[in-house]
Image (tube, grey):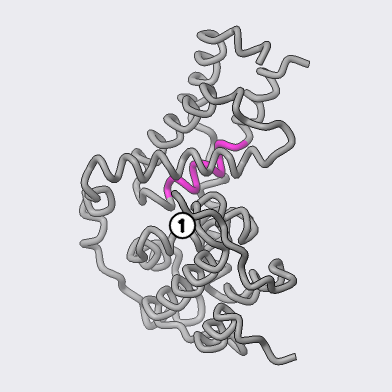
Amino acid sequence: MTKENRPAHGRPGDGAASADILGANSEIARKLKQYYEEIVSDDIPDRFTELLTALERADPSANGN
Amino acid sequence: MVPSQGFRQDLLLAIPSLRAFAVSLSQNADKADDLVQETLVKAWDKQASFQEGTNLKAWLFTILRNEFYSQMRKRGREVQDSDGIMTSRLAVHPSQQGSLDLEDFRLALQQLPEDQREAIILIGASGFSYEEAAAICDCAVGTIKSRVSRARTRLQELLGISGEADYGPDAIAAQVLGSGTSR
């Protein structure tokens, strides 16, 4: 908790490095996305829309922020 | 424009990826949805502390992650194996060498330590940058990089696939250590 992000090595192009470390087209990278997308593409369970509605009702003052 | 309605809508849109992250962390669908629920309630309460224009998704992921670890501490790190998930061992089918089975992948992912698993998910699936992932996990960028690298190496070992092309474990380690890529 105490440690803030210390400056990394200052390497340029972290976006590219991201692809490098994981191997953008590697089997692992593909499976990772497939695994994740399968969950993302699920329908949102009703409990969550109901929850948000309940929160909104319980706390109308939040409108003003 | 009512801010609250925009916020509600933004939360709604974030739910699918929050669920995916929660499942990745907890490895259990029911616990994951409880985590998401807790996250939404907390986010709603802390709504005023969210700074417009900053990354809402990263903010929500941070809340969810904190919730996960605080629950885990309470339960004495029993989260992962509580349902005997780990007892089902990895089985890589020889006939499927070419295309890795998703179920095998899932089992392999479960065997990673949480810190590596969350790192590789945030970077490889959730679409966060290393800087964002470091902020979410409250650690240094270099730490995230080495976790991703170790996670990948471990997954390759578990799944019996070799490092592809130019990016074997050694090349990855070299990059993470910042010892420079050949140009």
Residue ID for mark 1: B118
Residue B172 higher or lower than B121, as above or below: below
Q: The residue tagged with tag 1: helix, strand or loop?
A: helix
Q: Which residues are magenta?
A: B14-23
Magenta residues, dominant SS class: helix
Identify which residue is drawn at 51% across, 43% down. Answer: B62
Q: Observer-nearest residue: B101 or B76?
A: B76
Which chain's residue wears label 1? Answer: B
Residue B156 in the figure: left or right of residue A30: left
- Residue at (53, 51) in percent of width and height: A38
Q: Is residue A15 magenta?
A: no
**Which quarter of the image is occupied by the C terminus of chain A?**
top right
Return the residue nearer the eye: A7 or B51. Answer: A7
A18 and B131: which is toward the camera: B131
User: How would you rate the neighbour count of disc 1 (Cα within 10 Å): few for under 14, some for 14-19, many for 20 or more?
Assistant: many
Q: Position of residue B148 (x, y in %)?
A: 51, 69
